[in-house]
Image: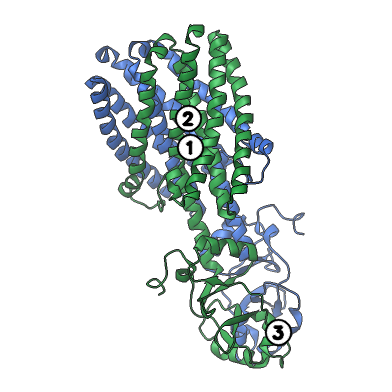
Chain colours: A blue, B green
Amino acid sequence: MNHNIYEIETTGTLMKQGYVSLKESQSVEQAISHLRNQVQGKKNIHYVYIVNTSKQLTGVLSIRELLEAPNMSKLSNVMKRDLIYFPSDLDQEEAAKIFRDKDLVSIPVVNSDKELLGIVHVEDIIDVIHQEADEDIGMITASGKEIDFNTSPIIAAGKRLPWLILLLFIGLISGGIIERFEETLEKVVALAFFMPMIAGMTGNTGTQSLAVIVRGLVSEKLNLKKATKLLWRELLVGVIIGLTCAVIIAIVAYVWRGSSMLGFVVGISLLATLIIGTLAGTVIPLILYKCKADPAVASGPLITTINDILSLLIYFGIATMFISKIV
Amino acid sequence: MNHNIYEIETTGTLMKQGYVSLKESQSVEQAISHLRNQVQGKKNIHYVYIVNTSKQLTGVLSIRELLEAPNMSKLSNVMKRDLIYFPSDLDQEEAAKIFRDKDLVSIPVVNSDKELLGIVHVEDIIDVIHQEADEDIGMITASGKEIDFNTSPIIAAGKRLPWLILLLFIGLISGGIIERFEETLEKVVALAFFMPMIAGMTGNTGTQSLAVIVRGLVSEKLNLKKATKLLWRELLVGVIIGLTCAVIIAIVAYVWRGSSMLGFVVGISLLATLIIGTLAGTVIPLILYKCKADPAVASGPLITTINDILSLLIYFGIATMFISKIV
C-alpha cells in the first residue's frame, strides 16, 4: 500500500503497518491492558513503540521487557531510549546490513519529524537478502535476474541473449587481434596451442577477483583507503598466482615443444595476463561502484571477454617480440 | 555450547537456550505471571512453548497471543497446536528455507521424544542465508570461501591457486586438441580468429545455466520430474541462443573473410557448441547434486574450461570435415 509514495527497494515500501504505539505517560499496567485489547488480529507484534506528546518516537520495549517491568512504572522510566530506527528512503540493502548487525526482529521507520510511519520486519529482510544474493549471482554470471526453474525457455533465452550478443561482438575483437598477428601465428602455429589456456586462465582470475568485490560490498562500504588496500591486495594475489602458474606453464611448454624460448614466451605472457586479469576484475567493478553505475555492467562474462582480449594482445605482443628466437 | 554433540551446520548447533516453556495445565494468568518472573535477562523471547506432563512439546503461543487470551483459560485450550519444529540434525539451509516460507522469528528444536531442546532464532538464520549465498558465489567463481576485504594476499592467493593450477592443466588439453588439428589450422589460419570467441561464448552460456541451477537449489528441492523439465528448458534455451548467435556470426565471418563456407563452418560450430555448453552447465551440477557430491566441483571456471575443450573439438572437427571447401 506504500508503493505509490515511496521509492522501490527502500524501507518505505518494505515497512508494514500493524504496530503498537503507546504513550510515554502510560504505566506498565495500563500498557499491558491496552496491548491486550489493541493487538487483536495484528501479527508479528514483538515490540511496542513509545511516543511523546508530539507523537515523536522516543523509546521501545520488547513485549518481554514490558512484562518484566514493575506494574506501576511509567513507560518513560522503563523504556529503552537508544533505539534504532530507519528513515523511509533507506535502501533495503542498507536496512538488511543493519538487521544483520543488530539482531533485531523489527525496526521502526520514522519521518523527518521522527513520527512513526511503520515497521520493517525481519521476515521481509530475509527476502531482501535472498533477492540481493540472486542479483549478485545474476550479475557475476550475466544470467539475468529472476530466472527460476519455472521460467519459460523463450523468456530465459530472451534475458540472456542481449548480453550474449554483446559479448559475441566484443569477442570478435579477439579475432581482429589474432588477424593482426597472423604472420606471427603462421610462423609459429604452436602459439595457438596455448591461446585458449592463457585466455581462460586470465578470465578465471578476473572472475575470482570480481566475486570477492561483489560479495564484499554486501557487508561493507568501500572508501578510498579500503579500495586502495584492496587493489594492492589483489595486485599481490595476481603476482603470486601469476608467478606460480608461469613457472609451471614454462616448464610444460619447454618439455612439450622442446623450445625453451617458447616456454619463456608462454610463461612471461601468463604472468603478465594473470596480473592484469586480476587487476581488471578488481578495478572495473570498483570504478562502476564509484560511479554509482549499474554494477551489472561488470558481469563476469564481460570481464572474462575483456580479459580474453587483453591476454591475446599481451601474448601475441610478447611472442612477436621474440619471434626470431622461437623459430 | 552444543558444538560437541551436534553435527556442524545443523539446527542442533544453531539453536540457543534461553526459551520459556510452560505447562499445558497452567492458566493464562499464571503463565503471564510466571513469564514476568522467569524472563529476567533472557533475550529474544517472542514465543512461549507449552509442554505436556511427559515434557513433550505440544503447543506454542506468541507473547502477543498470550496477552490476548482470557485470563482464566487453560494454556491447553488457547495454544496453537499445529506448530512447526525442527529435529536437531536438520541441515541449516533446510531450516532457512522453512523460516522463509513460514515467516516466523523463532522455531523450536526437539529430540526424537519430542522434548524441547532449544530454539533457532531468525537472526542466526540471516547469517546462514548470507553464508549460503557466499558459498554459492565462491562455487560459481571458484574464488574460495571466506575471502573478504581483509584477507591477506598470501591466504587469498593460496585459496585460489589450487583451482587455478587444476584449471591450468585441464586448459592444456585444449592445446593438445589444437595440436591434433595443427594441419587444419595451418591450412586455414583464419580459423584461429574465431577460436577465442567460440570458446568464450560456450563458457558464458555454461556459466549462465550453472548460476540458474545453483540459485534454484537454494529455494527448491529437485526431483526427477523437475530435473527433466529443467533439462528440456535449458536445451531449448541453448537452441534459441545458438540459432541467433550462429546466424549473426555466419554473416560476420562471411563479410569479414569473404568465404561463405567459413561463415557456414563458424556458424554451425557456434550453434553446436552453445547447445552443448548450455547442457554441460545444466547436467554437470545436476549430476553432482544427485550424487550428493560436493557441488563446489561444478564451479563456473571448471565448466568454462570443460566447455573450452568441447568447443574446440567441435569447431576443429567441423572445420576439418569441410577443409577442402574452405581453402
What residue does disc 3 label?
B78
Q: Is residue A12 above or below residue B235?
A: below
Depth order, front residue of B226/A239: B226
Q: Are marks 1 and 2 on the same chain?
A: yes
Q: Are marks 3 and 1 on the same chain?
A: no
Q: How far separated are the C-alphas under marks 1 and 2?
A: 10 Å
Residue at 51%, 36% (x, y): give it.
B280
Marks 1/2 in contact by CB < 8 Å: the verdict is: yes
The spot of residue B121 in percent (x, y) is: 54, 71
* Label 1 CA crowd tier, 10 Å (few <14, some 14–19, many 20+): some
* Label 2 CA crowd tier, 10 Å (few <14, some 14–19, many 20+): many
The amino acid pointed to by label 3 is Val
Residue at 28%, 35% (x, y): give it.
A243
Taking the view exactly as shown, the residue that stands out farthest to the front is B224
Parent chain of label 1: A
- Badge nearest the viewer, 1 or 2: 2
The amino acid pointed to by label 1 is Ile
Residue at 72%, 74% (x, y): give it.
A55
Parent chain of label 2: A
Give the number of the disc on residue A284.
Answer: 1
Element type at marker 3? helix
What residue does disc 2 label?
A306
Element type at marker 2? helix
Residue A32: in sight, yes or no?
A: no
